[in-house]
Amino acid sequence: MANSQDGDHTLLERYRDGDEAAAKAFFDRYGDRILSLTRLQIARRFTARFDEFDVLQTVMRNFLGNARQGVIPSREGDVWICLRRLARSKVINLIHFHQARKRNLEQSISDPELVEALETSSEHDAVELADLIEKGIQSLGPNESRTLLLMLSGQSDEEISNDLHVTERTVRRYRAIIAEHFSRLEC
């Protein structure tokens, strides 16, 4: 059982020895601090792509995974410094990932006619389009729905195939099913 008075090294040693309560105590000790720090570092335009909880989960998984293998900071105060650096590094990597040419938010809509249509559409048109998309997604199968969401997030066929554990040919088939499905929906 982890004691709230335990130091970081004691908690990490207990975790390394298999005490899951120590991992929870460690998470409780640093989770909110990492969330607060990360929240300040994520620009508003990236919040649709990832959030502070994604970063927290990765930081804790990496840090505790290393601790399980015996890799821990040498001094007690270095734990927060290490967690802070991991969180900052993860945010920077995610920003670079989402700024990549194929995922760049500024390039998400490239068709000039579509951009003009979206800029001149009324609020009523936007609501109708959102309803149509929601109706379409709900009537797709689970693989096609997931494929569509990954497509909308800017992922390539290769990335989608890796995520779904299928071949790229299967992803192209899902895309064809999605296109046919949406072409049959009434506007």
Image (spheres, helix red, strand yellow):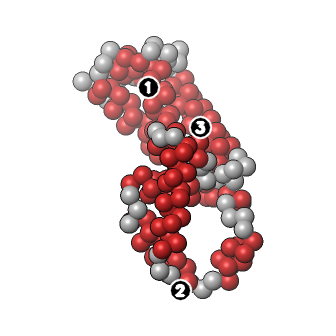
Q: Residues within 10 Å of mark 2 (few under 14, many from 20)?
A: few
Q: Residues within 10 Å of mark 1 (few under 14, many from 20)?
A: many
Dot 2: element: helix
Which corner quadrant holds the N terminus?
Answer: top left
Read off the residue under disc 3: 90
Residue at 61% in and 58% down: 44
Horizontal side of 146 relative to 168 (left or right) equals: left
The amino acid at mark 1 is: Leu
Q: Earlier in the sequence, mark 3 or mark 1?
A: 1
Residue 64 disc label: 1
**Residue 47: x percent and y percent?**
56, 55
Residue 19 disc label: none
Horizontal side of 156 relative to 19 (left or right) equals: right
The amino acid at mark 2 is: His
Question: In this orientation, does residue 41 appear?
Answer: no
Question: In this orientation, does residue 117 appear?
Answer: yes
- Of tags 2 and 3, the one toward the viewer is 2
Dot 3: element: helix
Dot 1: element: helix
